[in-house]
Image: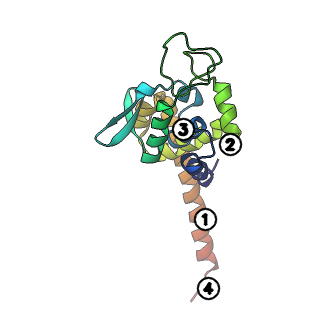
């Protein structure tokens, strides 16, 4: 997935009210923060907090500042009554942001991925594109700590981001060399 495609899908998740709220929220979290679908489905309402006019989602013990639109979507999702359960709720359980059909359990990864795919969001390429973008902006240890990645994984993503940049620089250098070689001599 290229960067433009990622941003278009993210914009759709944040603005398209015809999409289900849980699909919008899950898609935005994957496209923006590179969270794995299995991690997203296990998020609870208690991980969503507000203070000083800002909203945060705690991932791997670190609160991540949320953009206002995504914060509104997640707060709406947390406050929405969960009527999806096929059985009546018999136990209190976790306040899942993405509840499943079984009371007290989160949605299945397959179900979440299928809902996202129906709206053009393939979770693996979406996550990969987000991680490449983030690894270009954040040092590997910070990325690993915030998103709960293994440090070696974060270093590998940083390498992917640099490889992309190196490819651009090589192509640009080749273009400049060609321009010098074809420029009229005085």
Between discs 4 and 3, the one toward the N terminus: 3
- One can see residue 60 in this view: no
Percent x, y of residue 58: 40, 30
Helix, strand, or loop for circle 1?
helix
Circle 2 is placed at which residue position?
119
Considering only order in the chain, which callout, 2 or 1, is on the residue closer to the N terminus? Answer: 2
Residue 104 x/y as whole percent: 54, 15
Color style of the picture: rainbow
Q: Residues within 10 Å of mark 4 (few under 14, many from 20)?
A: few
For residue 47, the mark is: none
Query: Is 127 placed left or right of 46 in the picture?
Result: right
Dot label at residue 25: 3
Foreground residue among 40 and 13: 13
Query: Which residue is at 58% across, 76% downward?
Result: 180
- Mark 1 vs mark 3: which is more N-terminal? 3
Q: Which mark is residue 184?
A: 4
Q: What is the CA distance from the residue labelled 1 to the residue labelled 2? A: 39 Å
Residue at which label 1 appears: 174
Alpha carbons under labels 1 and 3: distance apart: 42 Å
Q: Residue furthest left?
A: 52
Q: Residue at x 48, y 27 (%)?
A: 150
- For the residues labelled 4 and 2, the Cα–Cα distance comes to 52 Å
Q: Upstream in the sequence, badge 2 or badge 3?
A: 3
The first of marks 4 and 2 along the sequence is 2
- Quick one: label 1, few (<14), some, or many (20+) residues within 10 Å? few
Closest to the camera, between mark 4 and mark 3, is 3
Residue 8 in picture, x, y percent from top left:
60, 53
Q: Relative to 70, is 154 above or below? A: above
Q: CA gap, disc 2 to disc 3?
A: 13 Å
Q: Secondary structure at mark 4?
A: loop
């Amino acid at each position: 997935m290229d960067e433009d495609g990622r941003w278009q899908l993210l914009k759709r998740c944040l603005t398209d009210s015809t999409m289900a709220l849980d699909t919008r929220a899950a898609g935005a979290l994957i496209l923006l923060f590179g969270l794995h679908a299995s991690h997203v489905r296990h998020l609870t309402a208690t991980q969503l907090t507000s203070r000083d006019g800002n909203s945060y989602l705690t991932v791997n013990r670190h609160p991540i500042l949320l953009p206002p639109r995504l914060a509104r979507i997640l707060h709406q999702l947390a406050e929405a009554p969960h009527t999806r359960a096929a059985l009546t709720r018999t136990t209190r359980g976790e306040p899942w942001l993405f509840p499943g059909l079984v009371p007290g359990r989160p949605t299945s990864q397959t179900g979440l991925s299928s809902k996202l795919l129906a709206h053009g969001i393939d979770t693996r390429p979406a996550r990969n594109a987000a991680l490449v973008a983030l690894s270009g902006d954040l040092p590997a240890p910070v990325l690993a700590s915030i998103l709960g990645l293994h440090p070696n994984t974060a270093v590998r993503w940083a390498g992917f981001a640099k490889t992309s940049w190196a490819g651009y620089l090589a192509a640009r250098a080749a273009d400049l060399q060609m321009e010098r070689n074809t420029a009229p001599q005085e």
